[in-house]
Image (cartoon, rainbow, N blue to C red):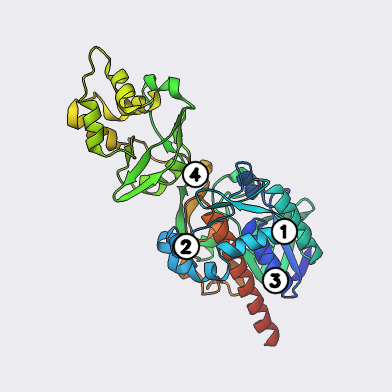
Amino acid sequence: MNERVDALIVGAGPAGLMAAESLADAGHSVIVAEAKPSAGRKLLMAGKSGLNLTKDEPAGRFLYAYAEAAAWLAPMLAQFGQQDVKDWAEALGSEIFTGSAGRVFPKEMKASPLLRAWLRRLGEKGVALRTRWRWTGWDGAECRFDTPDGPQGVRADATVLAFGGASWARLGSDGAWAAKLQAAGIGLDPFAPSNVGLCVDWSPHIERYFGAPVKGVALVVGEARYRGEFVISRHGLEGSGIYAVSRPAREGRPILIDLLPDWPVEKVQERLSRPRGKASISNHLRKSLHLDAVKVALLREFGGPLPDGAALAQRIKALPLAHDGPRPMDEAISVAGGVRRDALDDHLMLKQRPGVFCAGEMLSWEAPTGGYLLTACLSTGLWAGRGAAEWLERSHDA
């Protein structure tokens, strides 16, 4: 069977739904095709730990989080940025608040109410959602799908691809689309895990600390310092503090742990020089520096036999984090890699396929957690949707 529509969106995550709404607002008929049984599955998963919508901080600092992709994303984030995300959420009935670190959340701390309201609004605007429709590629100008009713084709005057990246495959972002785009001559950067834990081959004495949090530390990469907690797991290290350094870890850059980030090394050295009497080194560290058992265990694990005096103070302030690389990509919150900037025009349209646009995590950019990921997905979705609407207007005028 074949169907004709003004605009086709492939992928019902935040980027795809934002593109669909912008096209519907422009007066076009829109179909959203989603491979999973329901929309927004990764968004719902993110909401289980509190849906971080965006971050309230100066625009320049916010943009800096996107590293080398900042210049590319800048006009998109200027069109739909932090305040726009907050206004969007409130228009959908979600009361929001800003936490102490500037992170913005809905007060209910969940994604489901916001997603339900959004899907209801899209339905009222005439957007048709087709679930269990898995994209299988192009047949000429037509998009082909495997569906519960058998193979289906959709011919659209404009298409927005919003497949997601290649993490959390069970939620729909499996990266299977990449091979098809590469076969069509579209340039992609290889996927790599981002915002992910690190593998560590622990010695047996660490087993008692599996599941234990490590608090009040800083992770240091060159001149950059990151404050954040993490957890010792059976397979390594997990948590926001580790996710913040996942890119330099992936790139093989040295990472140091400052176990006492609020203390200068001189203070640490002075405390260590106090008489310890018959106390063990562990007890001396606990009493003189207030290092808990988990920090002492990490000090022994990564630091080897403990030296005395100034050398021990230096090790406490700059403990090398030994790891075996990132955890598997399917455990990553997000990925680096995807459709390259040079494969797209300024409207996010594929140069190799006029009328086909890309948005969201399938583009080659990465950012830390903290609201940056969702904000960029929404902004690139809107940008691609508006680009597709302009394409339709030009096509109709012609």
Q: Dot 1, crowdedness within 10 Å: few (<14), some or many (≥20)? A: some
Q: Hey, what amino acid is under mark 2?
A: Pro
Is tag 1's residue or tag 2's residue first in the polypeptide sequence?
2
- Write down the quadrant of residue 92 in the picture: bottom right
Is tag 2's residue or tag 4's residue first in the polypeptide sequence?
2
Pointer 3 residue? 23
Pointer 1 residue? 92
Residue at disc 4, secondary structure: helix
Pointer 4 residue? 329
Q: Position of residue 359 (x, y in %)?
A: 58, 63
Where is the N terminus found, in terms of image quarters?
A: bottom right
In the displayed orientation, state which residue is furthest to the top.
Answer: 278
Mark 1 in CB contact with mark 4 (< 8 angstroms): no
Is tag 3's residue or tag 2's residue first in the polypeptide sequence?
3
Is tag 1's residue or tag 4's residue first in the polypeptide sequence?
1
Q: Hey, what amino acid is under mark 4?
A: Met
- Write down the quadrant of residue 276 in the picture: top left
Mark 4 in CB contact with mark 3 (< 8 angstroms): no
At a point 37% along the width and 36% down the height, the residue shown is: 324
Q: Nearer the viewer, mark 1 or mark 4?
A: 1
CA separation in Å, label 2 and label 4: 31 Å
Pointer 2 residue? 58
CA separation in Å, label 4 and label 3: 33 Å
